[in-house]
Amino acid sequence: MNPGIGMPEIAVLLLLALIVVGPAELPKMMRTIGRFVNQARSMAKDFQRSFDEMGRESELADLRKEIENLKNANPANEITEELRKAKEELRHAEAVGAKEKAMKPPADPSGKPVGKPDAKFIEDDGNTIAPPREKPRPAQPIKTGAPEDE
């Protein structure tokens, strides 16, 4: 029962209905009210079921998306892609190695370089590298003041 309506209030309502409707029509009216309450309850249950069903459908849609993502995230495809990239890198390294080999003049049996590098493999990018100004010095140990340092 509702907290605002207690037994005395219900008794007053029944007495008022008996006086207004009359004893002959009171059972018909109570049946009509009962049907109305049952209909309202069934509508509320249908409403609740429809919300529950929509919730389940959205959960199923999320699960379907997750399953599709797992299907697309096939490890074999990832491995194949990595192997393809490695193959491209090896081809590039071979091309660079061939370019460097073409740039290096061939040596005769005495060890002296012969000829000039092939001009088609030399690219002038405008960058030049200057030789170092002085010979690098070896690193000096750091003195921490410990007895081993002295």
Image: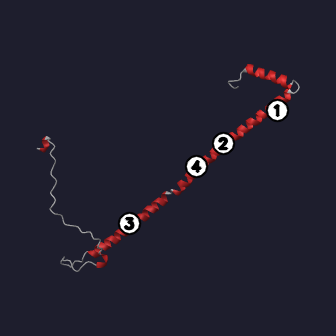
> Label 4 neighbourhood size at 10 Å, few (<14), some (14-19), many (20+)?
few
Residue 89 - label: 3
Q: Amino acid at mark 3?
A: Glu
Q: At x 80% / y 34%, what residue is drawn?
A: 35
Specify which label sits upstream in the sequence, 4 or 1: 1
Specify which label sits upstream in the sequence, 2 or 1: 1
Q: Nearer the viewer, mark 2 or mark 4?
A: 2
Q: At x 66% / y 42%, what residue is drawn?
A: 51
Cβ–Cβ under 8 Å for marks 4 and 1: no
Question: Residue 105: horizontal and vertical position, in percent?
Answer: 24, 77
Which quarter of the image is occupied by the C terminus? top left
Question: Residue 84: horizontal and vertical position, in percent?
Answer: 43, 65
Q: Amino acid at mark 2?
A: Phe
Using the image, determine if residue 108 lies above or below residue 55.
below
User: Which residue has dot 2 on it?
Assistant: 51
**Farthest top residue in view:** 8
Residue 32 - label: 1
Using the numbered discs, state the Cα–Cα distance from disc 3 to disc 1 in whole angstroms.
Answer: 84 Å
Q: At x 31% / y 76%, what residue is drawn?
A: 121
User: Which residue has dot 4 on it?
Assistant: 62
Q: Amino acid at mark 4?
A: Asp
Specify which label sits upstream in the sequence, 2 or 4: 2
**Farthest front residue in view:** 20
Using the numbered discs, state the Cα–Cα distance from disc 2 to disc 3 in whole angstroms.
Answer: 55 Å
Using the numbered discs, state the Cα–Cα distance from disc 3 to disc 4 in whole angstroms.
Answer: 39 Å
Question: Residue 87: horizontal and vertical position, in percent?
Answer: 40, 66
